[in-house]
Amino acid sequence: MPRLARQEIPHMNEISTINSPITALQLRDNLHYLHPFTDYAELHAEGSRIQDHAEGVYIWDTDGRRIIDGLAGLGCVTLGYGRKELAEVAARQMQKLSYSQSFFKTSNEPAIQLAEKLVELTPKGLNHVFFTNSGSEANETCLKLVHRYWNLAGKPDKRVIIARAQAYHGSTIATTSLSGNPVFYTSGGGMPISGIERIEAPYWYLNGAGETPEEFGLTAARWLEDKILELGAENVAAFFAEPFQGAGGAILPPDTYWPEIQRICRKYDVLLVIDEVVSGFGRTGKWFGCETFGIEAPDLMAIAKGITSSYFPMSATMVSDRIASLLIEKGGEFYHGFTNSGHPVGAAVALENIRIMEREQVVENAAELGKHFGEHVASLADHPLVGNVRSCGLFAGIQLVADKDKRVLFDEALRVGDHCSTEALHRGLALRAIGDTMTLMPPLIITRGQIDEVFAMTRDALDATARAFKAR
């Protein structure tokens, strides 16, 4: 592929003085494609990594490099790449009924079948489904339903939402506001919106000094009770949370956390909204993170990503009987929805995706492989750069620190995690840096041998990073 010198690229000399070669395809990408969550100056200086084709857990880029996708895309390509069955079912549905809107009392059979299947799979009491297209939209729908419910219940003052630091619930204005990383608010739009309060994350390694994980789980849960009492239970509408925090840094709560959270929500009549966008569809070794962490009967649950293994944009909000019955009996029109809600092609792909997962026992295999995966994660705890490791199913966080004994983090400006991610990519592994926490969440169809390969490259990347920063 032809490469162009930096000075030959129009409109970019003012952006960067880096004189790195860039391909013609990267140039076209730079000229027109604004990527999500991207530093555009860096992208235009370096050029994007362009993926060409993929199969199983492997991706090949346009430079011919083969990369193990240790991230399953964005935690979404559950069944891996190149599943012909999913392409074929999409083609058949496109030929039969390529689109059906769900407004104006209209429906379609694949959406009806998928709603039935999701009710079967998700926790007891979630017997209604509102279809959306992304995790952000699913969580936005949860937020609207919370407010709609309390208005219909005659308690309009219950409007405050409590969420957590380091949470991630999406990138719309409302869901960004629910998220707990202040850097997200710099994108504009008056974020965070009013009516959202915050408690700390159940991050034992950094927030639980002097307590066992079990003790800290109760402490962290009671931060919710303290906040409810501070605000007044009559004003608090809902608590939004992920079973484990993914994009916030792979934070796994202690076992004592969720039972206490549920007790508190019931005591003060606060709706419990669970974001299963990342943790759903087998990531934890169960169909949903609720099962893994013992979360019973949430009022609302957002699901996405693994619902179709991202072969088609699809998501949903699962709605409890408590909320749905009031919508049906007293609600009138619910002024909310999307052009592609309940898309027949997306529903058909999701149904086939779930059939494959059941037929091939993907969730059960992920649970079994999770033991081997977890052993590898634990083995990294002895590395001089690693302060803490944590894993659940086929999900892991590896915390990089400047001082293991004192739990001192690196200066953010050093971007140690980004350096480690680059070292891993050079070795053929996609490994995500969330600050200085390295995360892994490979496709659930990964094999034992491929897991061994992933962790060999991870350790090599850690060694190279340690050498680079020791030299400084």
Image (tube, rainbow, N blue to C red):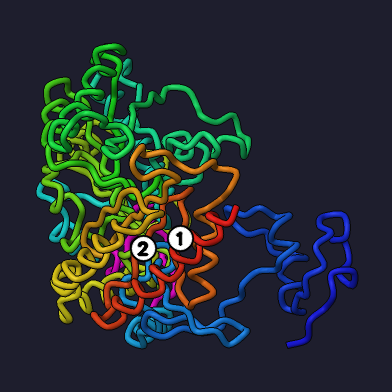
- Give neighbour class at mark 2: few <14, some 14-19, many 20+ (Cα, 10 Å): many
Q: Do the residues labelled 2 and 1 touch (CB within 8 Å)?
A: yes
What secondary structure is marked by label 1? strand
Residue for badge 2: 440
The part of the chain drawn in magenta is 97-113
Residue for badge 1: 432
**Magenta portion: prevailing SS class:** loop
Quadrant where the N terminus sits is bottom right
| Residue 463 picture location, percent across and down | 44, 65
Q: Which residue lies furthest to the front in this view?
A: 471
Q: In this view, does 207 lie to the left or right of 61?
A: left
Residues 26 and 113: in front is: 26
Q: Residue at x 44, y 69 (%)?
A: 99
C-alpha gap between disc 2 and disc 1: 7 Å
| Residue 301 picture location, percent across and down | 26, 46
Amino acid at dot 2: Leu
| Residue 68 picture location, percent across and down | 42, 77
In this view of the protein, can residue 171 be seen by the observer?
Answer: yes
In this view of the protein, can residue 332 be seen by the observer?
Answer: no
Name the image quarter holding residue 347. Answer: bottom left
Q: Which residue is drawn at 85% across and 75% down?
A: 5
| Residue 295 picture location, percent across and down | 14, 44
